[in-house]
Image (tube, rainbow, N blue to C red):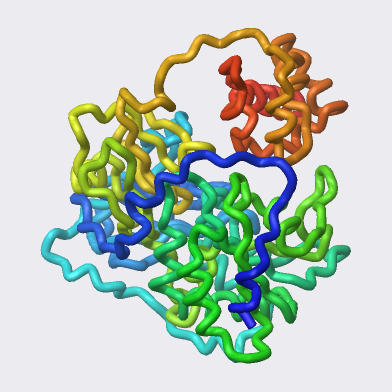
Amino acid sequence: MGILNLLRRNSFEHGIHPQQHKELTCRLSIRRLPFAPVLIVPLSQHAGAPAVPLVRPGQEVVRGEPVASANGFVSVPMHAPATGVVESIQLMPSARGPKTESIIIHVYEGSSQEVLYSAPRDVGSMTAEDIIQAVQDAGMVGLGGAAFPTHVKMKPPPEHKVDTLVVNGCECEPYLTCDHRLMLEQTDDLLAGIHIVMRALGVERAMIGIEDNKLDAVEVIARRLPANSPISVHAVQTKYPQGAEKMLIESLLGRRVPSGSFPSAVGVSVFNVSTLAQIGALLPMGQGVIERVVTVTGPGIRHPGNYLVPVGTPVRFLLEFAGSTPQAHELILGGPMMGMSVASLDVPVTKAVSGMVLLEASDADLRERKVQPCIRCAYCLEACPMHLNPSTLGLLAAKGDYETMADQFHLNDCFECGCCSYVCPSSIPLVQYFRIAKAINREKAA
């Protein structure tokens, strides 16, 4: 059933084809990273309200123990990524810039670091509400990078009837291969997580979309699917941003999500493979999210690989373990298209960090380019997967006309994929303009 779908190579309109650079790590198995001496656990690693501390300085914690509780429905708890003692709760640097309240844990060097806090449960006997609550209790967020609380996505608006679970295994960002390796090495956990979420959503069909530069993952999953399985696996064209949920829905189902709407408006829920694999592994054990797979790669890394990293590990520790070249110049958390460069190596790895890309000063992407006037070449229009007009939006941004950008030119439909900036021959930083415009509009609305 799944093998037949290898012949399908559907896609969406527009998009780009950046160099992949996945050969650096795509054949390297997942390795466990040693524990750093000190872990930094931010209370805000997700969209929504920050978690509320449950511990105090000087308190001992064991690996897996809840250390912060959810602060409302759109929030998730935090768990101790290692056995140790809470040194302090204080403001610490974050990848996004502003300092955020964090729990600092001194790791016990002599501990075996087994997960000592768990509450095994019979997932098969749980109701949909039980599953959703268990997912929140696990501190689960979207591990593809968005970090939106997963349990919220499992409760679509009552006016929207979801009929299909779409599983995102595209991993279209250059350099990143953590999802690819996870699909190959943790296939059983992934399929278990899919079945659990299907039950919670009440859907009878799941479709796994994987770009056709990862056909080994497609074949491995297809071989695990029995005849007449409600789960199917599909190879889609390798094109950026194929992994954006609206693009993948269009590629797999031919449905277009209306402007300003969410996937549930067309009967779909989209979940990343890493998120589903964690659900499949953690829910039966009654454990929380305390680690994730991170791709550490780039020309500036001596020992690239996919590492299983405790949440809260300082970026500096991970970088020292993987090694850097003398020419290393800029570090990006996430992928080079939608990730962010960090100014401090003391920021921690959070649940949202899927990769670390270290570039050298000689890399073409880092060469300083002078911004030139727009020449109206329309390359950005041809690249934009949301069919927006980035050229006009950029001109309006230059004038500070942010409200017109949103009201008349659908600024909020932009998900900042970076296609427009990538193809612009005038080197106009369009995505940065759009981020500023959105932020200013949000401040005005508030």
Q: Residue at x 61, y 71 (%)?
A: 6
Q: Quadrant of the C terminus?
A: top right
Q: Quadrant of the N terminus?
A: bottom right
The answer to whether one can see residue 280 in this image is no
Q: Residue at x 65, y 58 (%)?
A: 73
The image shows residue 197 at horizontal and vertical percentages of 63, 74
Left or right: where 343 falls relative to 20: left
The residue at the far front in this view is 7
From the viewer's perspective, is residue 128 above or below residue 263? below
From the viewer's perspective, is residue 285 above or below residue 302? below
From the viewer's perspective, is residue 189 above or below residue 446? below
The answer to whether one can see residue 128 in this image is yes
The image shows residue 240 at horizontal and vertical percentages of 59, 45
Q: Nearer the viewer, residue 258 or 367?
A: 367
Quadrant of the rendered image containing residue 31: bottom left
The residue at the far left in this view is 110
Q: Nearer the viewer, residue 416 or 1?
A: 1
The image shows residue 382 at horizontal and vertical percentages of 72, 33
Quadrant of the rendered image containing residue 80: bottom left
Tally the numbered discs: 0
Left or right: where 167 falls relative to 139: right
Left or right: where 56 falls relative to 217: left
The image shows residue 201 at horizontal and vertical percentages of 71, 74
Q: Residue at x 33, y 50 (%)?
A: 24
Q: Nearer the viewer, residue 89 or 186?
A: 186
Q: Nearer the viewer, residue 212 or 52?
A: 212
Q: Residue at x 61, y 78 (%)?
A: 2
